[in-house]
Amino acid sequence: MTETNRNRLMLAIAIIMAAIYLFPLYWMYVTALKTGSEMFATPPSFWPSTAQWSTFAYVWESRNMGRYLWNSTLIAFGSVALIAVLGTGCAYVLARYRNRWVDVGLFLILMLQVLPASLMITPIFVGFSQVGLLDYPRFAVILAIAAKSMPFFVVLVRATFMAVPMELEEAALVDGNSRIGAFFNIVLPLARNGILVSAILIFMQAFGEFVYSKSMIQNIELQPASVGLNSFMGPNTSEWNNIMAYATMYVTPILAIFVLLQRRIVSGLTSGALK
Amino acid sequence: MTNQIELSGVNKYYGAYHALKNIDLTIRKGAFVALVGPSGCGKSTLLRALAGLESISEGNLVIAGDRMNNVPPRKRDLAMVFQSYALYPHMTVEENLTYSLRIRGTKKAEAKKAAEDVAAITGLSDLLHRYPRELSGGQRQRVAMSRAIIRNPKAFLFDEPLSNLDAALRVHMRKEIRALHDRLGATSVYVTHDQIEAMTMADHVVVMRQGVIEQQGQPLELYDRPVNRFVAGFIGSPAMNFIPATTGPDGKSLILDLGRPQTIGLDRTIPANRNLVVGLRPEHLTIAEDGKGLLEAPVALVESTGSTTFVTTATTPECVVVVNGRVPITGGQTVGLNFQQEHIHLFDAETDSRIE
């Protein structure tokens, strides 16, 4: 087989894989634009005959999506802020010191990553309700998400910090800066890309978080869009086009961010961001 | 001359590992001191201890009259040039140079002026607005130097600053660093594993091994009178030839073991039947016709660089002879080797220390 043929075959396989992987997304967009009868037609149509754009406005109004998305945004930003402030310091220490306790710490951090949210929610719920945190349900969810996602952030950002040579900090110390000054002047600017990328990933996770929000936020006024989507779907739901329209409005902004930043995200995750 | 840096009884432990052992070192103001030794000898640790990047476990460190044992690096007022240069990648050359000034609250215009002045000295004037990644290795090296000299510190610390440069540039920068040192009247401590750098640049060379200072003194003093076999072998290139020997029954002759015993006379008297190691520098040996030398040796290899010729003998241990110019000999031939009495170094076979 020649080189070009081989490349063509590889490309074909890649396209097929991508098509399978992206099919649900496509189906979501298409279904959102279909009418009720077209949605249930057999064989299914792969392109809506007449696009129903009005569905979006109807769903946005009737489900009060503005409020849901606001709550989601608030929770996501809160979590990212908390994680970025606490996790950056934590990652720096874990990157710069090497001893037995650091190894124990790293192991525990990775352990936490293994525990699923659906398992953690019961003890968290009990604990939070006892200290009265459930009176501030959105803040409680932010805390829970921060605890859940911090390990991921710490592990990623630690790798970024490790790519910043120790000698740069030492040069700053000899040049007359303090340890803290060297961190803010030298290390942080150099690790900025890695931290930013990790924060974006955390944001996207937190924006779609469901288990904690569903369990801890009873008041519909305070629920994020993920919980709103869930309450939209009952056992006898048949309005799939409306649900898909909801999902479209929920997911598209995140997708847009990802597409816009994907080059930076990929390079931030793979390289040490230092050259 | 006043003392700029004084170390007395300095020890450094990493857990059970004893990295620096009883270091005593005095550095005069204006001196250029080279710390030299094989890798892992503690020379970099010593330099980092001076800078304050490593703490010292015991002993005293005094810089310009003040005890500095527990003073953080930023308050020691020293400047350091790192092996990797450690330029701040997110700052331009000018920002790199002025960083230390800006931390100390120097006014912007003043700092800019200082950067321009230093850049003029080191030939960086056209590069002030570039980033380190846009510079060549030699230019980065200059930036690292400039960053050190911009603020007139109490001493300069160099941590193998030339090891990332190619051979030609290294020789050039060697002279330039020394010239800069003289012009600024600075005090410099220079770490290197290259004894030629140490010999050519420094007024005072400190040879270290396994955390111990083996010998310190003027470069030629170390070359002429190494206190032990290690220093003798480390200083000088190519390295000194070592030949096991015993003293003759009268104590006035040496029986050298070059595969077969050969006897030479000695102008000193030492106890009879003592086991020794005789050291002869390759450049102190001369080639004579067979039968006309103090020693006889078959030739294994003749290598010429054009200006000098290296002759390796087929003896055990093998000896290297450096001859100026070219010699009409080939491998397999037997030649005589000559040398002067004053060039014979004697070391105890067990303790490796020098015997006068």
Image: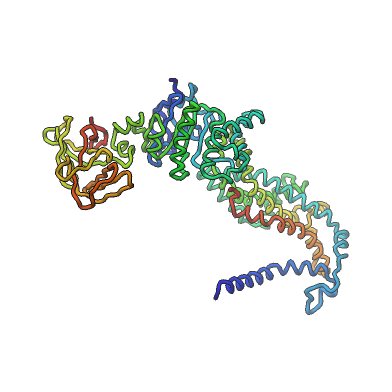
Q: Is residue B220 left or right of residue B97?
A: left
Quadrant housing residue A252: bottom right
Up/down of A5 relative to A272, above or below: below
Instruction: Give the x, y percent position of residue A264.
Output: 66, 54
Q: Can residue A94 be seen in this view?
A: no
Numbered marks: total: 0
Q: Is residue A254 left or right of residue B104?
A: right
Up/down of A241 relative to B178, above or below: below
Work out which residue is located at the far bottom of the displayed protein and give it.
Answer: A43
Work out which residue is located at the far top of the displayed protein and give it.
Answer: B1
Quadrant housing residue B225: top left
Instruction: Give the x, y percent position of residue B307.
Output: 32, 44
Q: Can residue B181 be seen in this view?
A: yes
Q: Which colour scheme is used?
A: rainbow
Q: Is residue B288 left or right of residue A241?
A: left
Query: For this rendering, which residue is in front, B215 or A231?
Result: B215
Query: For this rendering, which residue is in front, A6 or A207?
Result: A6
Query: For this rendering, which residue is in front, B80 or A44?
Result: B80
Work out which residue is located at the far left of the displayed protein and give it.
Answer: B249
Instruction: Give the x, y percent position of residue B203.
Output: 40, 29
- Image quarter where the N terminus of chain A lies is bottom right
Instruction: Give the x, y percent position of residue B346.
Output: 23, 35
Up/down of B13 relative to A141, above or below: above
Query: For this rendering, which residue is in front, B197 or B352?
Result: B197
Residue in view at x 59 percent, y 48 percent? A274
